[in-house]
Each structure stands twice: as C-alpha cells, then as structure tokens.
Amino acid sequence: MSDTIHHPLDDPATDPFEVAARAADDIARLTGVDRHDIALTLGSGWGKAADLIGETTATLAATDVTGFSKPALAGHVGSLRSVVTPSGRRVLVIGARTHYYEGHGVRRVVHSVRTAAAAGARTMVLTNGAGGIKPTWKPGTPVLISDHINLTGDSPLEGATFIDLTDLYSTRLRDLARRIDPSLDEGVYCQFRGPQYETPAEVRMAKTIGGHIVGMSTALEAIAARQAGMEVLGFSLITNMAAGIQTTPLSHQEVIEAGQQAEPVISALLARVIGEL
Ligand code: HPA
C-alpha cells in the first residue's frame, strides 16, 4: 500500500495539530505512558544514546502511530521508544525522522515534533549528522547548534503565524551541555534542501552568511518545536568536512562510517545531557 495517497497530513483541509494529537493518543495507548517530558530525535551517529538514557519500556513501529511515514533510508530506524531515566523522567525517543528532501511536504517533516509536544514534551532535543565548515572540526566532533539559517525557502508555519526565533536553541540548555562537556564548540546550522550534498560554492556562501554547519534537517523541526512552546537543544555530529573544505568527494558511506565511529562517545555525552534536563 502506498502511504503517500491517503496520508492524513497530505490533505490541506486537515489540521496538522489534530493529527499530532491523535498520534500522541496512539503513543500513550501503545506505550502505557500518558505524558512524556522530553523528546529526542536521533540523527545519524546518535542512535546508541537511546540505550544509555535509561530503561526502554516500550518500542513502537513508527508506522503504528498516526501520521508517521516509513523511513526513506535504510539505516534510519523507523521506531519510537519510550525510555524512563534513572530520575524518573519520561523520554520519547524518535528514531523516525522524515526529511524535507523526501518531498512529502513540511507537515510530515515536523509531525514528530508536533506529536512530541502533544505527548507532553516541553523539551525537544534534535540531533543530526552534518558537514562542518570550521576546519578545526574533524569528522566525529559533536557540536552544539547555536542558531540556524533556513535555506529551504519553506516553513512549517501556515498562514500569518509570526513566531519569535530569538534564542531558539536555548542558551540555558547549551550552557547545561557545556557544563557536562566544556570542550563542546557551537555553530550556526544551515539547512539546505538536499538530498544532494552542497557544492563547494554553496558551502562558501553558507560560510559567508554566517554558517558553520551544513545539513538537511533540524531547522524546520526547531521552528515547529518553538511554535509548540518547547525549549530546543540541538546537536550536530560533524560526519565530514563540508564540500570544498575537504578536497575529496563526499559519500553517504563516509557519513555513515563517521557516525558509527563516533557513536559510543557522543551517545554517552547525549545521555548525560538528557540526564540533567
Ligand atoms: N551536507 C549536508 N548534509 C550532510 C552532510 C553535508 O556535508 N554530511 C552529513 N549530512
């Protein structure tokens, strides 16, 4: 069955928040957890964090939850997990990201964030694998996202919805993360549409306009999280130096491998941060 034809978010007459509320009801029913406190989206390289945060009490196929799409990529886990931390906080771990480049529209891209908010989460932790512009960031370096530049030309907001994005990537939460790892650097994340990697000229542009990280997710999700009133913490794993910064061609394989190598260390860091939230 194609899920593109009858997808509830594809009908412009549908209220995406109502779909998110239904998804949150599904999650409560299937996990047995009425409210989650924190939501965590796992990008490439961050997958192991879920095991380190606490005890997984339920794992759901994302496709069992209203409005979630099948993951486009093998290697992206299409699951949602409910995890309880040692201090009793409930974390909704989202391993099923829909990327903008899949072309299903921005409503589907931010559905997981809206669902997390509807499930009660007040904190949204967004992680990704991305290209680094700062030459000192070797592949495998985790960095905090301090701000973003949305180069998709799109928005999850519909109509005249004017939302303030000052301090979108919470200074408070970045400070908290740096207390755990003082070596964490930070930078401005530029979201390109993808799925092609950037040209060297696009990376130079990103640098010129104030970017330090290039990727294909996160900015649209962060906007939706702010709209939902959540506090956002963003992490990028630098999986590669951005095109033209490194002279060799980029490959998806390289990105996956850098993620796998860094995974134990950055997952442990992320778990510690989550434990302090
Ligand atoms: N550009 C965009 N997205 C990415 C990159 C990159 O260099 N590496 C991993 N995801």
Image: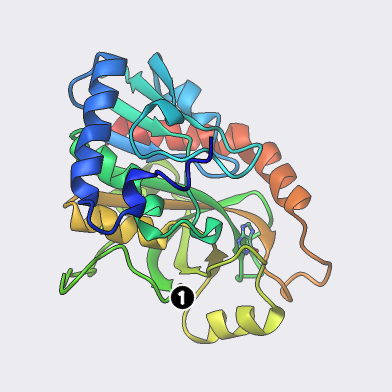
Q: Nearer the viewer, residue 105 or 229?
A: 105
Side of 123 relative to 208 (left or right) = left
Residue depicted at x 18% and y 34%: 120
Depth check, front residue: 276 or 255: 255
| Three-letter residue code for mark 1 | Leu
Q: Residues within 10 Å of mark 1 (few under 14, many from 20)?
A: some
Residue 37 in view of the camera: no
Residue 175 spot, x, y in % from top left = 31, 52
Residue 206 placed where, x, y %? 54, 80
Image colouring: rainbow
| Quadrant of the picture in which ligand 1 is shown | bottom right
Residue 84 image point, x, y percent: 32, 18
Q: Position of residue 117 (x, y in %)?
A: 22, 41
Q: Is residue 129 above or below residue 116?
A: below
Identify the residue position indicated by label 1 in the image.
151
Q: Secondary structure at mark 1?
A: loop
Give the residue at x 45% y 44%.
Answer: 181
In this orientation, which residue lies closer to the viewer: 81 or 245?
81
- Check the image and name the residue furthest to the right: 248
Where is 62 relative to 138, above or below? Answer: above
Residue 4 seen in the current view: yes
Answer yes or no: disc 1 within 8 Å of ligand 1. Answer: no
Residue occupying image coordinates x 46% and y 40%:
69
Residue 196 located left or right of residue 59? right
Quarter-of-image position of residue 66: top left
Q: Quadrant of the C terminus?
A: top left
- Residue located at (65% from left, 43% from top): 259
